[in-house]
Image (cartoon, helix red, strand yellow):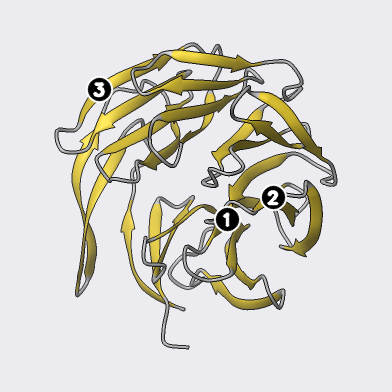
Amino acid sequence: MRLYKHFVCPPDKTVIVWNLCREEGNYGTAKKALRGHNHFVSDVVVSSDGMFALSGSWDATLRLWDLQTGITTRRFVGHTKDVMSVAFSADNRQIVSGSRDHSIKLWNTLGVCKYTIQDDCHTDWCSCVRFSPNTQNPVIVSCGWDKLVKVWNLTNCRLKTNHFGHTSFLNCVTVSPDGSLCASGGKDGNAMLWDLNEAKHLYTLNGGDVINSLVFSPNRYWLCAATGPTVKIWDLESKALVDELNVDRLSTPAAVECVSLSWSNDGQTLFAGYTDGLIRVYDIETM
């Protein structure tokens, strides 16, 4: 993979909407700033139809944004502490959030909390929540600072499985495009792979540093990890490292960490967000 371009994201309380243009010297330009949160924005996701964005904030709320107008259409109130993670279901009809108040909440798109998971929930911060796209096995996966990965039955919001194995707090969990696998990572530097259908641990990949973000490729059998200042990409069939993306130390003298990863829908472009306020864009070269 090669670095194509980077663009700047401001460290404030806004959500920035970008136009991606791939022009020489300018990959993207800021189109809108979505304002409304009164504390840091911790997570943002886009609906599968591209019409709406959902954000979670340290102000303990979620917001649903119309991306055409840039207006908040719904504000979700109910958490008592910072919202750490938000997600849309595959059909965009349900929303899940995880918080530092240890709870997980399931919402409809009108901003109504339909269920609060507290029984068997995390005993420390809930750092990440994700829906499985598999309608045959409808589950929510969460992870937290209690070192646990939890799998929840979406139909009744009851705990299905506790996955043990990590030795320190967890930052992230991600579900594969077919819903058969999930991966988790955090302070111990290990990316652990779990079989969601058979509820078992498969294997562990060593990231070598704190894992801040994990994402599966949408069209390849790859797992990408933001681990310290590096992005590592593994082939899950061979468990071999496909590539390791490092920041140019000459152009970035200060220590930076990669904290967020996202693939384009076609799987050809990887977006990586860093603590220096830059989003670096990597294109897959012909392999």
Q: Who is closer to the viewer here, 277 or 198? A: 198
Q: Residue at x 55, y 60 (%)?
A: 216
Label 3 neighbour load within 10 Å: few <14, some 14-19, many 20+: some
Mark 1 or 2: in front is: 1
SS category of the residue bearing label 3: strand
Please provide percent x and percent y for residue 18.
24, 51
SS category of the residue bearing label 1: loop
Q: Is residue 251 above or below residue 128?
A: below
Q: Who is closer to the viewer here, 20 or 230? A: 20
With 257 as the anchor, is 121 left or right in this view? right
Please provide percent x and percent y for residue 81.
56, 16
Q: Residue at x 73, y 27 (%)?
A: 159
Numbered badge on residue 84: none
Please provide percent x and percent y for residue 106.
52, 22
Circle 3 sits on which residue? 73
The amino acid at mark 3 is: Thr
Q: Residue furthest bottom?
A: 287
Name the image quarter holding residue 126: top right
Circle 2 sits on which residue? 185
With 202 as the anchor, is 78 left or right in this view? left
Label 1 neighbour load within 10 Å: few <14, some 14-19, many 20+: many
Numbered badge on residue 176: 1
